[in-house]
Image (spheres, rainbow, N blue to C red):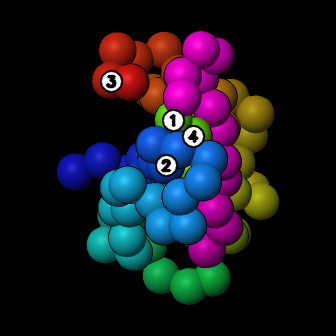
Amino acid sequence: MTIFGYFDDSNQAAPAFDPGLDALCPHCLRTLRLPVMTISLMRVGSRRSYFYRVHRHCQLHASSADIHRVESALIDSDIA
């Protein structure tokens, strides 16, 4: 199961893939429940824009290293 959703095109109103709220929070590894935050990011050279959701509390208390670890799982991968 992936935590990352994405839009294939900047004109899309709905994502091409949305992992939904059944995904795990990448910080605590528990199923998402409200309130959540949606974090957006884009790989250099990619046409896709990505997003992931985290528990609000987890994101607000995450260290820079924790956030970097989550985002590097996408940015440094070969999936896109």
Q: Are marks 4 and 2 in contact (CB under 8 Å)?
A: yes
Q: Quadrant of the C terminus?
A: top left
Q: Which mark is residue 48?
A: 1
Please report contact status of discs 1 and 3: CB closer than 8 Å, yes or no: no
| Mark 3 to mark 2 CA distance (whole Å) | 14 Å
Mark 4 lies on a secondary structure that is strand
- Label 4 Cα crowd, 10 Å radius (few <14 / some 14-19 / many 20+): some
Element on which disc 2 rests: strand
Q: Position of residue 54 (x, y in %)?
A: 56, 61
- Disc 2 + disc 1, Cβ < 8 Å: yes
Q: Which of the two labelled residues, at mark 1 and mark 3, occupies the earlier sequence position?
A: 1
Q: Where does label 2 land, which residue?
A: 7
Q: Nearer the viewer, residue 53 or 27?
A: 53
Q: Tell me the crowding category of disc 3: few under 14, some 14 to 19, or many 20 or more residues within 10 angstroms, Cα based.
A: few
Q: Is residue 40 above or below residue 37?
A: above
Q: CA distance from mark 4 to mark 1?
A: 4 Å
In the image, 63: left or right of 70? right
Q: Are marks 4 and 1 in contact (CB under 8 Å)?
A: yes
Which badge, 2 or 1, comes first in the chain's sequence?
A: 2
Residue under label 4? 49
Q: Which residues are magenta?
A: 36-47
Mark 3 near mark 4, Cβ–Cβ under 8 Å? no
Marks 2/1: CA–CA distance: 6 Å
Which of pointers 4 and 2 lies earlier in the amino acid sequence? Answer: 2
Q: Which residue was labeled with disc 3? A: 79
Hey, what amino acid is under mark 3?
Ile
Q: Is residue 1 left or right of residue 64?
A: left
Q: Residue at x 48, y 14 (%)?
A: 76
Write down the quadrant of residue 34 in the picture: bottom right
In the picture, measured across the screen, residue 12 lies left or right of residue 58, that is: left
Q: Residues within 10 Å of mark 2 (few under 14, many from 20)?
A: some
Up-down: is 75 above or below 49? above
